[in-house]
Structure formats: structure tokens, C-alpha cells
């Protein structure tokens, strides 16, 4: 297959052409579902590069040494001097770095890639070597939104973004006919002509000018889209210049800006929950700050899914009854640090919450061990183990290493959790509009999950049953939308909620035996609907015992009861004790409470912390 022979996807082709024309754009990210052709089109862009231009593909099992460069062990042993071995970033200098499935790449490696691309160089200072290499390259990345997302920090540094939809029936028939006609050897002449045109346009690009009127139009379009930072207008200016040169124009017109505007803003624009007021406090008038012609595109698929929730699936559980109410969510706030005890299992995972031993060759090298045979040899520890025996082994010109001297690297990296939110939406939560503050607290926890790269799931219980309204997903934005639409009303089947959470934990455990789970129960504990003939609290104690005995499952209880009232039941605390879990109130979740706790301890006070297993911002029992 050839680049010019790729059916449809004109926007994605244009974005790749502009990124290859001007590497200063920072690259392009192709977003879409599986089967949309993202990876194929990204690899076909190699045919548009001049001969001998580097085209480096980044593997998902990438290590820090392979990315940045490290010591050339073989050359060092032969010469006796440290010799630097270049990494993928320096090898991609002057060409293209392809990051397929960028959402699966560890965040720390992604930060190094975008930093090197922005600075144009990579520095290595490790294992006795210190060197610097040039690293100016164009990043071409692919992203599957339903499998994961990227942080705004990384997205903002990729100049262009395109959402690729699946082909329709007509395009599929056209593709099938073309494949039947030329099944083996496609005609490469189209790619050669396009590559020659790219060379000519790249030479003419510095001569394209940007008039002041077009620059004002460009800035107004970015202001109208409410994008954060200033990289959007810088990328839009470069993209408009490249497109004007591609069209053979000598200066940039507003029409050129309109053409590339969706490519620049698609992955940058955010829709705020509440539109912020104008800075001067007055209502904006059309034409005051932005022209009416450029309309902001839809937000990126990895942050706001394009499909709507299935009918009847937002956790309604009989919504529509007279007592059902949908109350708004409260204002989110900064959440205190939520950390949990480490275990001794080795995993192949990534995230930003809990440190774990890493089974692969990624992560940070923390110690060496002789009990882990493999390919990841710790050279420094191996040389130290072999050094005392060199005279006895008759060393002459090189170090003599035997199998007993080999030491292997133990690596660590942070991982994300699967966070199961079990939310009480019964009628008692609607009293005094406590569900508003509760939704705000859960939104704050969801934001913390997004920052820590956790997966989330949402279980709601009300009336007579519980429902998994959102299976485990990496889309925190989808969970936020489902949460805002949850109604309140009816009885409190707390046992049904715990049972649904227990079953979901079992399902996840069968698929991923080493996965860490965090169950967040949000309720006031006033259960009044059972599952069997047993008393309600007897059911709760039995279910709590089952959950407590599950391995690798941490529990946090968020007590939503209004503690300012004279009549307090503290039933959520009793349930937390049965679960052997910390119990926090809505106020305890705030980061300001942690600051006050530290200040009290420094002043000699003895504030109490929530008891329970694990940690929830503070170590248990302190």
C-alpha cells in the first residue's frame, strides 16, 4: 500500500504532510478506533521522506537506556574507557520518531520524548558517562481513545491532532476493488511525486509571510476556542504557513487559517464545566474578541468520548418516579494524598500512584540481585562481584566474569489502580442536597485518578438493587458525565452495592490476578433494604468479611453524613470498621485538612487520623 493510495482520511493525510513540511510543529497525533488505519497511515508517511532520512519506531517495551542512550558495555570492556551508545532519540535526529499506541507508553518516557523534541537535544549523565546529542525530529503518534488517554502536558506539545473515523460502505467497496486489482505491487509513483513536491515546498516555506491582519484573525480564533497556554497559536501560525506554502501562496490568508484550525485545536480544546465569565465582568458581544467565522472544533476523543451513553444506562435504576431528582455536582477541590502499602509482586504496568516491582526492562534500576536470571544484567554489580577474584583467575588484559558473578537489575516503577466507586444514590442522600457535595467530592477523586493514570468503574445502588453504570474504563471524563446525571431517590440497598462491587472485583481478579484495586464506598451507611431474610447489618458484616479477605483490594469509606447535626449515627464508621478500612468525611478528603494536620503535629498536637488498613493520605493509626 502507498500513502497516496490510502483511501479517504484527507484530514489525517494533510496533518502528516504539514508535520513533515515543518518539523517545528512538534508532530501529529492520529486518534481513532481500532481498524481506522491509524498505524498503517503513520507508517506509510515514511515513503514521503527524502532518502536516508531516519524513521525510528518506538517499541512499547522501551527502556530508559534504549531511549536516551547508555554505556556501550562491549566497547567499554575492550578499550577500558567509557563509550557512549546513542539511544533512539539521537538516532531519530533529522527524521521521524513513530510512537504507535502512545497511550500505552509509560508517562515518564513520554515526558522525556516531548522534552527532547522541544529542546532539540538529549543529555545523558549516567554510569560514568556524560554526553549530549542533537535530537531534532518529528513525532508521529497514534492513539486509541477507548483504551486510554494522554495528559494535557503531552497533548499540548504535539502540534497537530486528527480524529480518524472508520470508513463507510462506499469507501470500503472502493478499497476492496483496488486491492483486487493490485493485490501485490501497488504503484509507488504517486508517493514519489508527492515526496518531490514536499522537497520543493520545504525550500519555499521560509519565504511565506504572515500579515498582521491574519495574525489578529489567528489569535482571535484561539481565544474563541478557550485553549490553555500559548502553544496553540504558535502551532496554528506554523501550520497556516506550511499550508499556505503547500498551496503555492506567498503569504498566509484567513482561509488558510480556517483550513488548519481543526488540526491544531482538536486535541487541545477543553469544554469547561461552567463557562467562565469575561474578564471585565460584562457579557461578551459578538465580534468583540473573535470573528464569527472560525468555529471551534469538537474536543479530542481521548478526553470527551464522541458517542453518547447507551439508552437507559446512566444508572437510572427506575429513574422517572416522582421522588427522583437529579441535583447538580458541587465544586471540585484538591484531594489529599491517597497512597497505599506496597506489595512484593512483580508487574508489567504503568501509572503514577503506587510504586511496584517491574517485571520488564523498564522502570528505574534500584538494586541488584543474583536470584533473577534474565537478560537485564547489572554491569556495575557484576564487576564488583568479579573484581576480588581476578588475581586468582589469572587476569591479564580483560576482566574475567563467570556465571556466579552475574547480577541482575531489580527495577521499580509506579502503577495505577482500578478504582471502583460504589455510590449511594438513595433518598437519604437527597436530604439537605448532600448529594451535591458528594458529587463534588467524587469529581475531585476522579480528577485525582486521571492524574495518577488509574482506571475507574462506577457502581450505583438505590431503591432495591445496584447497577454497574460504568464498567472499568480509562475515560475519567465519561465517568464524570455519568456521575453528573445520576438521580437520587428510594431506599438504600447498601448490601446490593457491596455485592456488586465484590462480583466486579472477582471478574477483574480472574483477568488480571496481580491488579491492585481500590474500592471507594461513598455512603452515609443508613442501609434499609436487604437482599435476603437476614437482618440488614448481618448481611453487611458477611459481605464486609468477603471483601476484607480479598487480596490486593484496598477499601476507603467516604462518610457523607452531615456531622454538624446533633443526631449523628456514624453508621459509615461502623461499616468501615467491619471492612478494616479508613473512613473519611467529605471534609477530610480536602488537601487543606492534611495541611492543618501537619501544622498541628509540628505544634505538638495529637490529632487523630482515621483507623484502618493501608493508607489514605495519612498512615493508619497515627
Image (tube, rainbow, N blue to C red):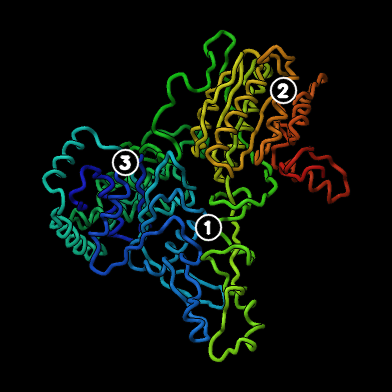
Q: Is residue 368 above or below residue 494?
A: below
Q: Is residue 477 above or below residue 424?
A: below
Task: Specify the quadrant of the image occupied by residue 468.
Answer: top right
Which of labels 3 and 2 is toward the front?
2
- Residue under pointer 3: 35
In the image, farthest residue toward the left: 181
Residue shown at the point (82%, 42%) measured from the top left = 621
Q: Is residue 364 above or below residue 391?
A: above
Badge 1 density bin: few <14, some 14–19, many ≥20, Cα 10 Å: some
> Residue 43: x percent and y percent?
29, 55
In the image, farthest residue toward the bottom: 396
Of the two numbered discs 3 and 2 on the same chain, state the one appearing first in sequence: 3
User: Which mark identifies residue 360?
Assistant: 1
Q: Is residue 86 above or below residue 272?
A: below
- Helix, strand or loop at disc 3? loop
Badge 3 density bin: few <14, some 14–19, many ≥20, Cα 10 Å: few
Q: For this rendering, which residue is in front, 213 or 82?
A: 82
> Residue 433: x percent and y percent?
65, 20
- Helix, strand or loop at disc 2? helix
- Residue under pointer 2: 540
Q: For this rendering, which residue is in front, 295 or 137?
A: 137
Amino acid at each position: 500500500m502507498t500513502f497516496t493510495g490510502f483511501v479517504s482520511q484527507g484530514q489525517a493525510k494533510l496533518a502528516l504532510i504539514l508535520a513533515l513540511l515543518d518539523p517545528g510543529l512538534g508532530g501529529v497525533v492520529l486518534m481513532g478506533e481500532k481498524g481506522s488505519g491509524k498505524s498503517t497511515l503513520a507508517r506509510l508517511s515514511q515513503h514521503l521522506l527524502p532518502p536516508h532520512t531516519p524513521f525510528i519506531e518506538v517499541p512499547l517495551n522501551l527502556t530508559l537506556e534504549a531511549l536516551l542512550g547508555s554505556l556501550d558495555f562491549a566497547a567499554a570492556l575492550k578499550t577500558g574507557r567509557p563509550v557512549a551508545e546513542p539511544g533512539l532519540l539521537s538516532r531519530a535526529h533529522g527524521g521521524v520518531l513513530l510512537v504507535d499506541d502512545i497511550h500505552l507508553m509509560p508517562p515518564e518516557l513520554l515526558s522525556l520524548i516531548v522534552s527532547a523534541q522541544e529542546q532539540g537535544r538529549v543529555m545523558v549523565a549516567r554510569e560514568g558517562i556524560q554526553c549530549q546529542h542533537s535530537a531534532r525530529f518529528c513525532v508521529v503518534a497514534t492513539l486509541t481513545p477507548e483504551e486510554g488517554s494522554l495528559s494535557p502536558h503531552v497533548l499540548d506539545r504535539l502540534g497537530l491532532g486528527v480524529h480518524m473515523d472508520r470508513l463507510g460502505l462506499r469507501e470500503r467497496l472502493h478499497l476492496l476493488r483496488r486491492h483486487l486489482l493490485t493485490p501485490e505491487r501497488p504503484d509507488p509513483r504517486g508517493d514519489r511525486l508527492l515526496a518531490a513536491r514536499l522537497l520543493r515546498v520545504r525550500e519555499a516555506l521560509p519565504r511565506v509571510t504572515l500579515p498582521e491582519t491574519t495574525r489578529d484573525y489567528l489569535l482571535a480564533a484561539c481565544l474563541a476556542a478557550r485553549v490553555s497556554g500559548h502553544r496553540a497559536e504558535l502551532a496554528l501560525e506554523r501550520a497556516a504557513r506550511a499550508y499556505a506554502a503547500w498551496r503555492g501562496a506567498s503569504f498566509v490568508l484567513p482561509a488558510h487559517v480556517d483550513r488548519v484550525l481543526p488540526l491544531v485545536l482538536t486535541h487541545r480544546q477543553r469544554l469547561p464545566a461552567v463557562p467562565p465569565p469575561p474578564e471585565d465582568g460584562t457579557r461578551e458581544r459578538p465580534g468583540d474578541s473573535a470573528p464569527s467565522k472560525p468555529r471551534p472544533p469538537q474536543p479530542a476523543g481521548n478526553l470527551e468520548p464522541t458517542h453518547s451513553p447507551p439508552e437507559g444506562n446512566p444508572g437510572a435504576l427506575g429513574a422517572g418516579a416522582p421522588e427522583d431528582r437529579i441535583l447538580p455536582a458541587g465544586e471540585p477541590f484538591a484531594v489529599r494524598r491517597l497512597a497505599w502499602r506496597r506489595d512484593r509482586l512483580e508487574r508489567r504496568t504503568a501509572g503514577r500512584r503506587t510504586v511496584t516491582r517491574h517485571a520488564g526492562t523498564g522502570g528505574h534500576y534500584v538494586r541488584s540481585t543474583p536470584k533473577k536470571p534474565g537478560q537485564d544484567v547489572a554491569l556495575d554489580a557484576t564487576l564488583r562481584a568479579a573484581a576480588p577474584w581476578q588475581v586468582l583467575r589469572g587476569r591479564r588484559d580483560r576482566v574475567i566474569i563467570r556465571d556466579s558473578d552475574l547480577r541482575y537489575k531489580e527495577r521499580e516503577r509506579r502503577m495505577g489502580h482500578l478504582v471502583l466507586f460504589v455510590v449511594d444514590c438513595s433518598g437519604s442522600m437527597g436530604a439537605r442536597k448532600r448529594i451535591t457535595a458528594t458529587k463534588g467530592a467524587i469529581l475531585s477523586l476522579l480528577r485525582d485518578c486521571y492524574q495518577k493514570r488509574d482506571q475507574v468503574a462506577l457502581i450505583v445502588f438505590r431503591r432495591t438493587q445496584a447497577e454497574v453504570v460504568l464498567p472499568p474504563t480509562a475515560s475519567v471524563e465519561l465517568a464524570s458525565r455519568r456521575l453528573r446525571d445520576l438521580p437520587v431517590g428510594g431506599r438504600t440497598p447498601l448490601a446490593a452495592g457491596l455485592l456488586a462491587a465484590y462480583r466486579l472485583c472477582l471478574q477483574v481478579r480472574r483477568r488480571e490476578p496481580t491488579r491492585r484495586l481500590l474500592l471507594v464506598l461513598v455512603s452515609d451507611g443508613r442501609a434499609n433494604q436487604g437482599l435476603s431474610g437476614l437482618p440488614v447489618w448481618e448481611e453487611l458484616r458477611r459481605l464486609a468479611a468477603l471483601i476484607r479477605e480479598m487480596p490486593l483490594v484496598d477499601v476507603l469509606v467516604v462518610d457523607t453524613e452531615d456531622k454538624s447535626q446533633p443526631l449523628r449515627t456514624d453508621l459509615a464508621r461502623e461499616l468501615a470498621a467491619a471492612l478494616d478500612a479508613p473512613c473519611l468525611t467529605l471534609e477530610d478528603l480536602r488537601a487543606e485538612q492534611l495541611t492543618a494536620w501537619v501544622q498541628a503535629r509540628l505544634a505538638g498536637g495529637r490529632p487523630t487520623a482515621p483507623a484502618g488498613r493501608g493508607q489514605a493520605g495519612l498512615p493508619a493509626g497515627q
